[in-house]
Amino acid sequence: MIHLAKYKCSISIPSAGMAETGGNEATVDERDGLTVIIDVLRASSTIVTAMARGVSEVKPLDTDDTRSKGIGEWRNAGYLLAGEYRGVKLPGFEIGNSPTELIEYMESGHRRIEKLALKTTNFTTLLYRTGIETAYICSTLNIGAVVRRLMEEGRDRDTNTNLVAVGSRLGVTEDLAVAMALYGCLNDGLEPNEEYLRECIIGSRTAKYLAGIGYWRDVVFISSQIDRYEVVPVLNEGVIRCE
């Protein structure tokens, strides 16, 4: 593992439960550096899975997007609609915010999916409340690819990287574990401890909640497929693509 001199990292934990409270208090520092957004259960994992399986574009939706344009217009524009509120699939959407549902949909003989529109309780709310313009998207599924990209971007210059552990009203354990793994890789040359990452994901309150509403398969998939995909989704000007 490569050590980077003067590589500066900060870890941000935005206010949890923003969508529940309606507050606008969350802030993310994007000053002169790189931003990495981590929402392991499940938005980051859904996005990474989509990109790894050939989806070219993911459009994060705010509540106003679904109200003003209507979900029918997004569908007519060629988007598969994926979304949830408090983990449960949104009415009228094809799938939830679920990497396993996405895989099943793609393998069940439906039309080829090139674009995904995504609405979630925490991830998309964070984007619109903070105004983040550019960021890498990280999950356990692509942690190695993200580390390599950050090392490439930060080489030979004094770069600040802000690792954003999105979290939720249930906590931030799983996202913070990935943020700490990234920090350890970049600053100390440490390999990610896969067993610890699995423990933090499976043991988190979010995982237990998802299991209770029927999404244990997502927890198992995300915790058991560490470093599976060599993709780094990039948010830029409101759209996520692989660059």
Image (spheres, rainbow, N blue to C red):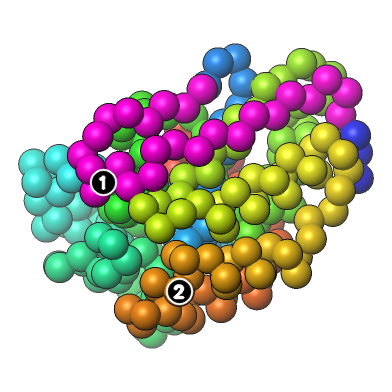
Residue 47 is situated, as x and y percent measured from the top left of the image, at 47, 56
Q: Is residue 1 visible?
A: yes
Q: Quadrant of residue 221?
A: bottom right
Helix, strand or loop under label 1: helix
Tell me what residue is drawn at x 15 percent, y 48 percent. Answer: 66
Q: Magenta part of the protein: which range?
A: 4-29
Q: Position of residue 90 (x, y in %)?
A: 20, 65
Q: Position of residue 44 (x, y in %)?
A: 49, 54
Q: Residue tagged by mark 2?
A: 208
Residues under labels 2 and 1: Cα distance?
A: 20 Å
Task: Give left or right: position of 70 versus 233.
Answer: left
Q: Quadrant of the C terminus?
A: top right
Q: Is residue 5 shown left or right of residue 224?
A: right
Q: Residue at x 51, y 22 (%)?
A: 29
Category of crowding for the residue at label 1, using alpha-carbon neighbours closer than 10 angstroms: few (below 14), some (14–19), many (at least 20): many
Give yes or no for residue 28 being in the magenta stretch: yes
Pick the residue in front: 148 or 16: 16
Residue type indicated by callout 2:
Lys
For label 1, the residue is 19
Q: Is 200 placed above or below 147 here?
A: below
Which numbered disc, 2 or 1, marks the residue closer to the eye?
A: 2
Expressed as whole percent of the image width and height from the top left, the position of residue 164 reads: 54, 38
For the question of whether residue 81 can be seen, the reply is no
Q: Residue at x 37, y 80 (%)?
A: 212
Q: Is residue 26 above or below residue 29?
A: below
In the picture, measured across the screen, residue 225 lies left or right of residue 185, that is: left
Sequence-earlier tag: 2 or 1: 1
- Residue in the image at 80% along x and 38% along y: 186
